[in-house]
Image (spheres, helix red, strand yellow):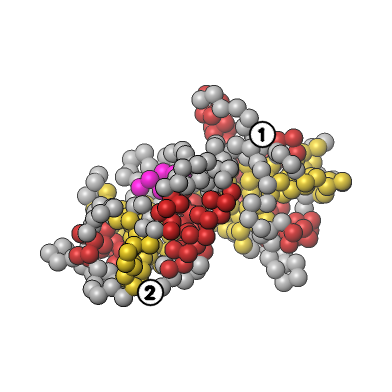
């Protein structure tokens, strides 16, 4: 008996996601890329999202499922774990198997046979542009794909929460000043290695958001001293000399196969990102030397109070808005906006306790601070 999806949002978004993958594959093929994952059709997309959504609302021994589903046959991966008998793809199956596959990097492999989708096993490796559906929390589904070179965080395509649909607009930087981290999250730049600076900053952002306490990170140019004009002294948690554990790893030469170095990098990222939970701002330079944390931001002498900021969100239908800083968030958002207004060479990252995540940078086009809300890209 054929599976019939009933989650309305899955039907609404499936066609748009199908077109996204068609465009994605066409552009890659035109550039000579090979060994790409099989494109999912509209029916497959709708079914996978539907099953993922209904399974997310169930519980197994008091725990909600956290699952990553990848659409590919066993032949498109290396060293797959294959079940002797394929499992039916439904919410009950996913809920039962979820406790064994919820760790990061594990995907349930799903493929089609005789017009029906089934679960064939698990895999740790998926091909370029492989279609992935993540169950992140009850009612929250993230559609994403593996990057073309497989380095760094997967690229998000859409986020569904209940009936709310947010589709990522990968053209949103075409008429805006966008910081490099945003361009990378939209898959507009190539991350060259496991310790690419932007890849590290993306990992930092994900870790900073995940501790759930809220936090602020200020990134200043190497050797810059003007930032001190915007910080209230004395700084309680000043680090002397600057801590260079993460910066030393960022300077290493090597490639993505160096598992030990990647593990060390994750530990250092978790170490520094954890400091952002302390009240005040964490300050690092662009080479990831830790300068201070718990720093209180103040308005630099002679600088005006920031009264307006430009706001954008890289989703379809998102438009630039001019807001008062207080409309975006609380004291943390206002103080980081003031810092970037006073120190336009700097970038500020703010994680809210409610999960929102904002990048503050100076826009030369608009001659003001710009706030890019990006939690849709970090899930």
Give the left or right position of residue 165, taking residue 343 as reference.
right
CB-based contact (under 8 Å), mark 2 and mark 1: no
Q: Give the range drawn in magenta.
A: 179-186
Q: Name the residue under label 2.
A: 279
- Of 351 and 292, which appears nearest the observer? 292
Q: Mark 1 points at which residue?
A: 38
Binning the other alpha carbons within 10 Å of mark 1 as few (below 14), some (14 to 19) or many (20 upward) gives some
Q: Cα distance, mark 2 to mark 1?
A: 47 Å
Rendering coords of residue 281 (x, y %): 35, 67
From the viewer's perspective, is the residue at label 2 or at label 1 nearer? Answer: 2
Name which residue lies at 71% across and 56% down: 101
Rendering coords of residue 114 (x, y %): 82, 36
Q: Is residue 269 above or below residue 175?
A: below
Name which residue lies at 29% across and 53% down: 222
Name which residue lies at 41% across and 67% down: 276
Rendering coords of residue 214 (x, y %): 44, 68
Which quadrant of the structure image shows residue 74?
Answer: top right
Which quadrant of the structure image shows residue 357?
Answer: bottom left
Q: Quadrant of the N terminus?
A: top right
Name which residue lies at 79% across and 56% down: 93
């Amino acid at each position: 008996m054929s599976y019939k999806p009933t989650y309305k949002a899955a039907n609404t978004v499936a066609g748009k996601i199908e077109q996204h993958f068609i465009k994605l594959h066409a552009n890659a093929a035109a550039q000579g890329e090979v060994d790409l994952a099989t494109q999912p059709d509209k029916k497959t997309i709708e079914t996978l999202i539907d099953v993922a959504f209904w399974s997310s609302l169930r519980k197994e021994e008091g725990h909600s499922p956290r699952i990553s589903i990848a659409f590919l046959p066993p032949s498109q991966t290396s060293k797959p774990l294959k079940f002797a008998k394929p499992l039916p793809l439904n919410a009950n199956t996913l809920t039962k198997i979820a406790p064994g596959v919820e760790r990061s990097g594990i995907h349930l492999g799903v493929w089609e046979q005789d017009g029906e989708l089934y679960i064939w096993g698990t895999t740790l490796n998926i091909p370029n542009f492989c279609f992935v559906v993540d169950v992140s929390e009850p009612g929250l589904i993230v559609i994403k794909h593996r990057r073309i070179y497989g380095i760094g965080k997967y690229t998000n395509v859409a986020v569904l929460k209940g009936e709310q649909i947010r589709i990522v607009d990968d053209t949103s930087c075409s008429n805006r000043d966008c910081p490099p981290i945003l361009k990378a999250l939209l898959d507009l730049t190539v991350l060259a290695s496991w310790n690419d600076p932007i890849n590290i900053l993306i990992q930092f952002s994900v870790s900073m958001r995940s501790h759930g306490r809220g936090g602020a990170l200020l990134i200043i140019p190497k050797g810059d001293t003007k930032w001190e004009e915007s910080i209230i002294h004395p700084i309680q948690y000043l680090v002397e000399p600057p801590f260079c554990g993460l910066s030393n790893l960022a300077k290493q030469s090597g490639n993505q196969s160096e598992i030990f170095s990647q593990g060390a990098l994750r530990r250092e990222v978790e170490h520094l990102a954890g400091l952002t939970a302390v009240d005040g701002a964490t300050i690092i330079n662009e080479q990831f030397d830790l300068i201070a944390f718990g720093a209180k931001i103040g308005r630099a002498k002679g600088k005006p109070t920031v009264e307006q900021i430009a706001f954008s969100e890289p989703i379809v239908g998102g438009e630039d808005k001019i807001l008062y800083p207080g409309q975006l968030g609380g004291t943390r958002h206002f103080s980081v906006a003031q810092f970037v207004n006073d120190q336009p060479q700097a970038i500020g990252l703010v994680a809210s306790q409610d999960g929102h995540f904002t990048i503050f940078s100076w826009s030369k086009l608009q001659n003001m601070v710009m706030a890019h809300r990006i939690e849709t890209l970090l899930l």
